[in-house]
Image: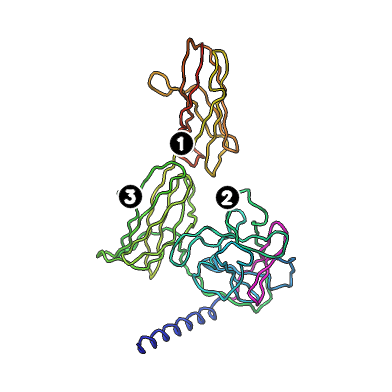
Amino acid sequence: MAVTQRRDLLSLALAGALLAVLVLAASADATYYRIVNKETAWCLEASQAGTVALNPCQASNNAQLWERWDRGWTRNASTGLCLEAAGVFSAGSIGVAPCVWDEPRMNWLHWYGGWYERAAFDSQGVSNPPECLSRLASSHAVTGVACDNPLGPNPPSELWYAVEATPSPPFPQKPASPQLDPCRPLRTSKGLRLRVKFRRSRRVATASYGRRLRVHARLVTASGAPVVGAGFCIGVQTVGHAQVRAVGLRATDARGRFSYLLGRGGTRRVWFMHHGDGQSASGSVLVRVRAPVTLRASPRSLRNGQTVVLRGRLGGRQHIRGLLVELQAWRDRRWVPFCLSRTNRAGHFRCAYRFTHSVGVHTYRMRARVAAQVGSPFETGTSRPVRVRVSG
């Protein structure tokens, strides 16, 4: 027991010494920023007591200068402390504390057009609701809140921008930057085998919008031995874009496995990337999402010579203006197009049709079809049919 304790103490001492060497060996050309709230145009400021607040920006106030570190650290240049979230959405849940490498509560991303978001996972790789930095109403205080729709519009209190500033030395320096981007797909190294798949060993899946699919992954050596505790960055690559956007982290278990539940979204490729000990492994799956289309008719019952108005909407978070919508009717055992429309900025479309050849009483089945097309984040999708009764 004593020998084990001595070994633990020695390991801790060596780790501390290594971190000190990294800090001392870092370059002195760090870049600092002021984090400014768009609602007030005030700057985020830290104190030695571990609190943060919004105050009018001052060029000579070093407590308002922040340094963006690797893996999401946001370090205050004056106090040397890092921005930290408590993980609860309440007043006083945001503060500063001694920096801890790879601590998820200190891992921040500045994206989505102004959000300052804490990583949505904990140290065990369990997903948590995303937490965003926000100004507390009518005060200088800041708080953590559940992030709104990433495509907005968002409350100005949740939006931030960074202004580059040059501090007067000396300031705390950052450790040496890892040269390898942890969220960049690279070829899997010899000696490793990575397998990512949906159920039934599929690597491509088609689903309705809103259905959340689970991906399973396993990392083993060439001999089949599991690689335990390997960290993976999970990234999303939307159709037509080369950039991979990081969305989470996972780590392999004792069997070299982990799973990940995909969020809602359009058609996209999901990447799983591991870089460590001079080796890399990357794999991906493709999610094809059918266009979520709804349709309604007014009126539902009319006479020959009258006009029915069909209104619909392309759902989802992404609304692309000008997408072609085909209105169809069931005739002769097939769907026949009778009207074309296009979506507006909100995803809505409309078509009016006048019945002129109906004799007797007929019930028509109609639907909307949005085909896969350039600029659309979806595959081909159709609405549920609506029924229209026409009396001749």
Depicted 275 relative to depicted 27: above or below: above
Residue 102 to residue 303: above or below: below
Front tag of 1 and 3: 3
Check if residue 48 falls in the magenta segment: yes
**Element under disc 2:** loop
- At mark 1, the secondary structure is loop
Q: Which residues are the magenta region? A: 28-53
Residue 311 highlighted magenta (yes or no)? no
Q: Would residue 56 appear left or right of 308 to someone viewing this image?
A: right
Q: Amino acid at mark 2?
A: Asn
Tag 2 or tag 1, which sits nearer the N-term?
2
Q: CA distance from mark 3 to mark 2?
A: 30 Å
Q: Is residue 2 above or below residue 63?
A: below
Q: Which residue is mark 2?
A: 149
Q: Tell me where residue 99 sits by quadrant.
A: bottom right
Q: Residue 301: x percent and y percent?
A: 53, 19
At which x and y percent is residue 156?
67, 54
Image quadrant in which you'd find residue 116 = bottom right
Q: Secondary structure at mark 3?
A: helix
Q: Amino acid at mark 3?
A: Arg
The amino acid beneath tag 1 is Ala
The residue singled out by tag 3 in the image is 199
For this rendering, which residue is in front, 231 or 386?
386
Report whether 325 appears left or right of 96.
left
- Name the side, left or right, on which 150 lies relative to 328: right
Q: Which residue is mark 1?
A: 372
